[in-house]
Amino acid sequence: MSHLIDPSAGSHVRDLHVDRSKAPRTVEFRIPISPTQIFFSQVRFFNFALRRLSDRRYRDARLSITVGDRCDLDAVRRENRWSENFNINWERTPDDVFADFHWAGTAIWRFCTPATADVIVHCDADTVLLRDINPLVDEFTSYAPTVKGHMAHFPPGLGANPIVPQPNSADFWPALFRIFSLPWPAKTYRYSIDPDHRLPISPPYFNLGFVAMNPKALDVLATEIWATMRSLAHAIGDSLNVRLRLQ
């Protein structure tokens, strides 16, 4: 699903007008992890699958790994000397970000570093590319902030909260938009595992396990995301579920 973002209207979105330039888009990938052997192995496998693709832009693509848990980044690099042979960047989540948001902060910190390609793909460590994603990458526009993603399976789990209705209520998302004084988006969607349409419609609510954007969209997020995260926590309180934070 593609969305063109109008930063002046908060989260307002409208249909994407695709700029079909013949020049292939460059792409970079960003993955958040904790400094554990399991995550290191997942990153290495992701890199292996990425570099075996025939298109040179994947073999040469920058792979940025954001590491949380107040890690020793030099130790992380020593543990992953194999990465010196590839275009891989290791970055440390700032301590204050990790203190405030824990591993959610690691995931979101990826939005705060400048783009190095035409398309930035944010993905989880347990994902892998089995083939190229050229149809997705090459249809990106360059003239407006654009995000592409997959709708979440279900509404966020918040539990009981007197501030907002239950997430499976048709009033849930409109209530959040009112709290933040945002206009309702022009286009809404169904959750991805709701074949019978039993759940209410939702604004674009992407699974952060694999979401792509262009640099202009990244700039919007980098500018707005921390204030939005803190405002959301203040508005909803302790029931702010990490699933809501990360989708």
Image (spheres, helix red, strand yellow):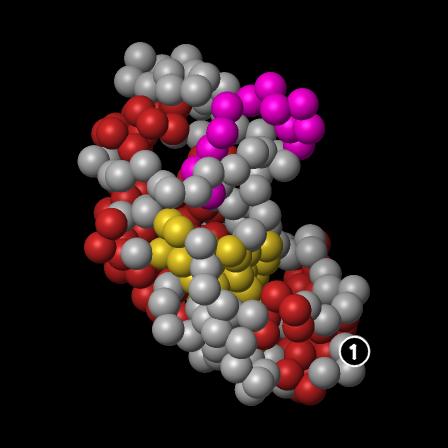
Q: Position of residue 206 (x, y in %)?
A: 52, 45
The kind of residue tagged 1 is Arg
Q: Is residue 121 above or below residue 209?
A: below
Q: Is 236 in front, or is 171?
A: 171
Image quarter for residue 170? top left
Is residue 197 inside the magenta stretch?
yes
Q: Position of residue 214 (x, y in %)?
A: 44, 68
Which residue is labeled 1 in the image? 52
Q: Is 123 in front, or is 77?
A: 123
Q: Is residue 19 visible?
A: yes
CA neighbours of label 1 inside 10 A, class few (<14), some (14 to 19), many (20+): some
Residue at 79% across, 78% down: 52
Magenta stretch, main secondary structure, is: loop
Q: Is residue 143 above or below residue 238?
A: below
Q: Position of residue 231 (x, y in %)?
A: 24, 38
Residue at 37% across, 50% down: 13
Q: Secondary structure at mark 1?
A: loop
Q: Is residue 21 left or right of residue 57?
A: left
Image quarter for residue 56? bottom right
Q: Which residues are magenta?
A: 193-204
Q: Is residue 205 left or right of residue 113?
A: right
